[in-house]
Image: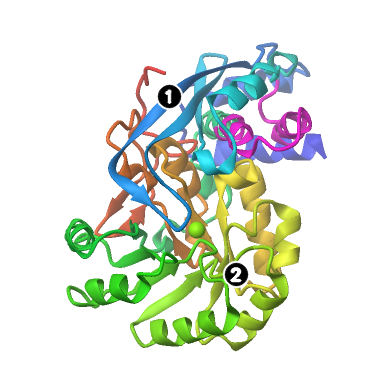
């Protein structure tokens, strides 16, 4: 199998125009002699704090900063970048991520193309820690894409013209602030509105007094009664809402299945769906799933979850935390294959150290940069 994969990669490289920062053919020339490069993978990380442009309020909490880890994997003079975004309510922190990442020994590997083995190892170091694991995964995928001289959407065979419009998120707030945010969202074609704190109709009516753009709503488990939830969904449907994300607590599986069966709008599981086994559990309970790199340990598992959900006939959206352009660009590589994208996390922060995939006229616009789509640069991380 390994030989076949390398043969395939070799042919892919020969067939395309190399964009890579190194000449990838040299790597295979060496391999062709029966000897892989002996360079070790060099992994490093450092804490970072994202500053949010606005106080961000959802059904369960408010905050102005997000703790982060920035990661790098270097091999043979090529650098892949990664990141962990750790909103406090999910349980990871600078402390937990430092503890976890200190245990990651990538120097035992000298072939970055063995992504499955490397990331299986990372996953096996300790349970949990999905964002910290994602920070290794994203850096490795960035590195491998750069070595191949291709962005991942091309390696996966996706058509970049199929990327969806991305939504702009409006948190729960006073009508005055909501009006301001609707103005800021002018370039976006879809609004994602946070609900679930008892001001739901006021939030939607405020927005509808200003615009008739499609809205999707995220209740973040805020509705506790299934009949109330169904009444709200019918009301929202009349307001041109496209879908409802995580309307009820993730533990209320039977109520949620009933709600999905009766709902006139698709229901999307977010808090209820983290990793691969949750996709199977969500089948028949939700219409679809929200995949986030920080929940599912990164691009490797996100890609598998997307394929699994599709094979089960489920809808798929790809979402994010407040993140830099690093993780947003990585998630965007999957976006040609999803129904909805909610990848605005980098637009909500004021200190993004990266430059990557952009939103142009409201649409995610994938670029030609190899790896995860970061504009080449010597990022000071
Ligand atoms: Mg959500």
Q: Residue 28, position in %: x, y? A: 65, 24
Nearest to the observer: residue 284 or residue 156: 284
Whichever of labels 1 and 2 marks the residue nearer the N terminus, that label is: 1
- Say whether residue 37 is left or right of residue 147: right
Q: Quadrant of residue 106?
A: top right
Q: Is residue 19 visible?
A: no
Nearest to the observer: residue 45 or residue 379: 45
What residue appears at the point 51 percent right and 48 percent down from the top-left corner? 154
Q: Is residue 196 visible?
A: yes
Per the image, the residue denoted by label 2 is 288
What residue appears at the point 78 percent right and 19 percent down from the top-left corner? 34
Per the image, the residue denoted by label 1 is 48
Tell whether position 330 is magenta: no
- Describe the element under mark 2 as helix, strand or loop: strand
- Describe the element under mark 1 as helix, strand or loop: strand
Quadrant including the C terminus: top left
Q: How is the image coloured?
A: rainbow
Circle 1 packing at 10 Å, graded few (<14), some (14-19), many (20+), is: some
Q: Residue furthest right?
A: 1
Nearest to the observer: residue 255 or residue 156: 255
Say whether marks 1 and 2 touch (CB < 8 Å): no
The label shown at residue 203 is: none
- The secondary structure making up most of the magenta span is helix
Stretch of the chain drawn in magenta: 111-138
What residue appears at the point 66 percent right and 56 percent down from the top-left corner? 305
Q: Quadrant of residue 232?
A: bottom left
Report how far apart the C-alphas of labels 1 and 2 lie in the structure: 33 Å
């Amino acid at each position: 199998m390994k030989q076949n994969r390398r043969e395939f990669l070799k042919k892919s490289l020969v067939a395309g125009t190399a964009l890579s920062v190194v000449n990838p053919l040299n790597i295979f020339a060496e391999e062709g002699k029966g000897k892989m490069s002996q360079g070790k993978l060099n992994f490093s990380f450092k804490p970072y704090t994202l500053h949010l442009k606005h106080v961000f309020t959802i059904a369960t909490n408010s905050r102005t900063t997000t703790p982060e880890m920035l990661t790098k994997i270097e091999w043979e003079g090529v650098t892949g970048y990664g990141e962990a975004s750790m909103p406090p309510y999910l349980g990871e922190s600078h402390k937990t991520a430092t503890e976890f990442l200190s245990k990651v020994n990538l120097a035992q590997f000298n072939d970055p193309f063995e992504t499955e083995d490397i990331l299986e190892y990372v996953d096996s170091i300790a349970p949990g820690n999905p964002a910290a694991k994602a920070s290794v995964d994203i850096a490795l995928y960035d590195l491998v894409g750069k070595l191949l001289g291709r962005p991942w959407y091309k390696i996966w065979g996706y058509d970049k013209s199929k990327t969806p419009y991305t939504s702009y998120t409006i948190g729960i707030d006073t009508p005055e602030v909501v009006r301001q945010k609707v103005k800021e969202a002018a370039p976006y074609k879809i609004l994602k509105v946070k609900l679930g704190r008892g001001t739901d109709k006021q939030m939607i009516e405020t927005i509808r007094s200003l615009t008739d753009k499609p809205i999707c709503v995220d209740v973040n488990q805020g509705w506790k009664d299934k009949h109330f939830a169904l009444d709200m969904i019918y009301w929202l449907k009349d307001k041109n809402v496209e879908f409802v994300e995580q309307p009820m607590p993730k533990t209320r599986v039977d109520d949620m299945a009933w709600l999905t069966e009766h709902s006139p709008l698709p229901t999307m599981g977010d808090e209820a769906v983290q990793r691969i086994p949750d996709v199977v559990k969500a089948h028949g309970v939700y219409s679809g799933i929200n995949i986030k790199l920080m929940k599912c340990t990164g691009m490797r598992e996100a890609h598998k979850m997307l394929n699994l959900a599709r094979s089960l006939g489920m809808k798929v959206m790809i979402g994010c935390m407040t993140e830099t352009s690093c993780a947003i660009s990585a998630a965007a590589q999957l976006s040609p294959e999803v129904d909805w994208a909610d990848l605005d996390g980098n637009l909500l922060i004021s200190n993004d150290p990266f430059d990557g995939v952009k939103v142009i006229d409201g649409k995610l616009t994938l670029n030609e940069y190899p790896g995860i789509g970061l504009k080449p640069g010597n990022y000071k991380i």
